[in-house]
Amino acid sequence: MRGKIDTILFDLDGTLYAKGKPIKSAVNVIETLRKEKVKLAFITNTDGWTVEHIHKRLIDMGFNIALEEVFTPVAAVKQFFADNKDKSCYLLVTDEVFESLKGLKLNDINPDYVVVGDFSDKTNYEEINKVFRFIMNGSEILALSKANYYFQDNGININTGAFVGMFEKACEKEAVLLGKPSKEFFNLALNRLGSKAESTIVVGDDITVDITGAKAVNAISVLVTTGHYNEEIVKSFKEKPDYIIEDITHLPSLLMEE
């Protein structure tokens, strides 16, 4: 496989690390792959933190990863508006993410787009209704996630996708997703690397987002059985990964296979 592969996109939580600690020898695996001169990117659906915040967490865990190798929905928003410089937006995101996106063409009267991400630190009726009115008056929706819930140590929590779905239903308008598993998200990540999907591997633990996203752009998909892996979901899911490995430590040997 190695001869035709020049890029690997890694999911983060559940693939490289779990509960804030690297999975097995994940740190060493990344170093091994760097010696093979493949381009690496690290992609996540986390939409409530800046790219810098996520990068620091990876560094603190011991990973040798450059800031520009981390690609998130927040990074995708920056890239989207860099490609559409004439378009304005209103940001419904956390204060931390807002600060990192202040350089965009902001508009709180009649924006071309409303960007809906995690806004848990400012959730209130007035803010939600303001965005609703923007959309009803013609603004398009850019969603940083369509996941309805997520799990933390404190249990299950409502996620960005539930609010996106509310806006979609209320305004009878479909959001453009700038997160996994959308084709747009993966293409933005590949374009930034100058890579083609047919020579790229996507590695992840969630068949519904990582493998579906890989299939959307015709990349090679590798599912790991760590993190959010669920055998029953894998068996019943329409899309099937090209490869299943126990964990990330088996990736280098998979690359060496003919």
Image: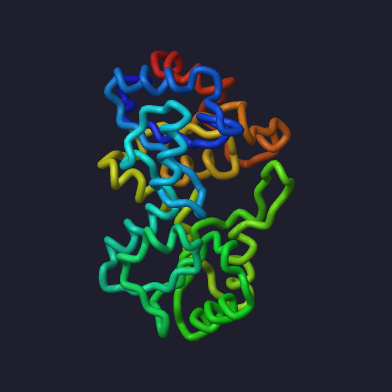
For the N terminus, the image quarter is top left
Q: Is residue 181 visible?
A: no
Image side of residue 108 versus residue 12, left or right = left
User: Residue 170: x percent and y percent?
Assistant: 63, 77
Q: State the colouring used for the structure image.
A: rainbow
Task: Identify the residue at horizontal 46%, vertical 67% (top origin).
Answer: 115
Please determine whether, in this image, residue 49 is positioned above or below residue 5.
below
User: Residue 172: x percent and y percent?
Assistant: 58, 77
Please determine whether, in this image, residue 30 is positioned above or below residue 230.
above
Task: Identify the residue at horizontal 42%, vertical 63% (top origin).
Answer: 98
Please determine whether, in this image, residue 214 is positioned above or below residue 244.
below
Task: Identify the residue at horizontal 57%, vertical 57% (top origin).
Answer: 146
**Who is closer to the viewer here, 166 or 94?**
94
Image side of residue 135 versus residue 246, left or right = left
Task: Identify the residue at horizontal 45%, vertical 43% (top origin).
Answer: 54
**Who is closer to the viewer here, 75 or 211?**
75
User: Residue 186: x percent and y percent?
Assistant: 41, 47
For the C terminus, the image quarter is top left
Tell me how many marks there are.
Answer: 0
**Who is closer to the viewer here, 217 or 138?**
138
User: Residue 164: x percent and y percent?
Assistant: 58, 66
Q: Is residue 188 visible?
A: yes
